[in-house]
Amino acid sequence: MNGFLKYFFLFILLAAISGCTKPYSPPEISSPGSYLIVEGFINSGTDSTVIKLSRTVSLSNTGVSSPELHAVVAVESNKNVIYPLTETGNGNYASAGLNLNSANTYRLSIKTASNVQYYSDFEPVVVTPPIDSVGYQVQSNGIQVYLNTHDPAGNVKYYRWDYKETWQFHAEYQSLYVSNGNAIVPRTSAQMVYSCFGNDTASNILLGSSAALSEDVIYKTPITQIASASEKLETKYSIQVNQYALTGDAYSFWQNLKKNTEQLGSIFDAQPSQINGNIHCQNNPLEPVIGYISVSTVQRKRIFISNAQLPRLPQWNTVYPYTCSVDTDLFCRPEGKMCQNDVALFLIPAGYIELPIDLVTSNGNGPPSTLGYSSSNAQCVNCTIRGTTLQPGFWK
């Protein structure tokens, strides 16, 4: 669920009293109580099943979410077949492809380290149809990525999508030199920090339904929009979209969650409401549990968009996330009859990286000689501050 539920439960309590004009700190803000968050789904196919367990934190807590560690997690069938998941760290529990029988129903079992038992409801296997295509449309201010899909059998009416973006970008300036502590030397190939890869994941809930249509067809549903001046479009951009089929109840859960997390903030938006998942505490049936466990396969499709495919207009020029400038560091300064030494070159402020610059002068009729180098802030020449130089295996 990509973190949508981290603070949701306590946020609803706060939103219910946000209309007060007198400052007031309700006990819910600092309440030590925490509730289980269950993220993920049971993958009935050949791909891995990954479940993430964590706990809600109070709104007064500025730290990170609290992972639920050392739990015993398993998938159970209505035929009493058990498929254990292995703890992989940071609240994650995983299993290799389960290849479940679609004739059965399945649930998730969780027993915490404090011996509290949770079960999800038994759910049927929903087979996700393939993604027909992922495309994009050029707009005046960027591109709109969209998706097409359909179920020829007409069995699937409800869908959810998420995605992972990867893009190739470069620093504003290219650094071919670096200080080794004693001198400025050329960078080796392993030290090059001009071209990098960045990535991001979906931060909102993407849903679609064909229930009101005569055919189960989803056409050009929006996935994400990218601004024309974004670094994502500077060189090459790729997006992998994941598609999940849902039951009607699962769709209602996600739709309600979307309203409560993305569509609140003004008097015209939906009012906060309780979200009922399908996970329950056996020890205390009244204890809220946040999450919904579905059982389905997943379909994926990836596309690439090259900068050469986009318009050549001023508004499509990349705007870098930092304000960059270049300073000059000379070996010597002809301020008198004798040049200064190169102290200025080696006492460069912290966070600066050397760049080559065409500072040359002719010594009479002899060959030109380099006077010095230019430098800029690290974030302007070092792309690894916000990316990695390691090319993904799927890149082409």
Image (cartoon, helix red, strand yellow):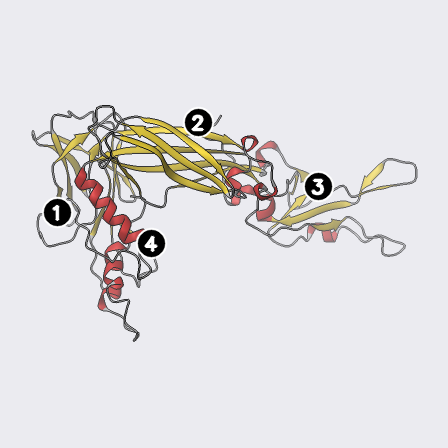
Q: Amino acid at mark 3?
A: Pro
10 Å crowding of disc 4: few (<14), some (14-19), many (20+):
few
Q: Nearer the viewer, residue 354 or 138?
A: 138
Q: Nearer the viewer, residue 301 or 367?
A: 301
Q: Earlier in the sequence, mark 3 or mark 4?
A: 4
Task: Indicate the position of residue 104 as horizontal and vertical percent values.
Answer: 11, 28
Task: Indicate the position of residue 122 as horizontal and vertical percent values.
Answer: 11, 37
10 Å crowding of disc 2: few (<14), some (14-19), many (20+):
few
Q: Residue at x 17, y 41 (%)?
A: 249
Q: Which mark is residue 394?
A: 2
Q: Which quarter of the figure has residue 165?
A: top left
Mark 1 or 3: the one toward you: 1
Q: Earlier in the sequence, mark 4 or mark 1?
A: 4
Q: Amino acid at mark 1?
A: His
Please give left or right for residue 69 compared with residue 79 in the image.
right
User: Above or below — where is 100 with respect to 332?
Assistant: above
Between the residue at mark 3 and the residue at mark 4, the CA separation in whole angstroms equals 42 Å
Q: Which residue is mark 1?
A: 280
Q: Which residue is mark 4?
A: 64
SS at mark 1 in the image: strand
Q: Which residue is mark 3?
A: 356
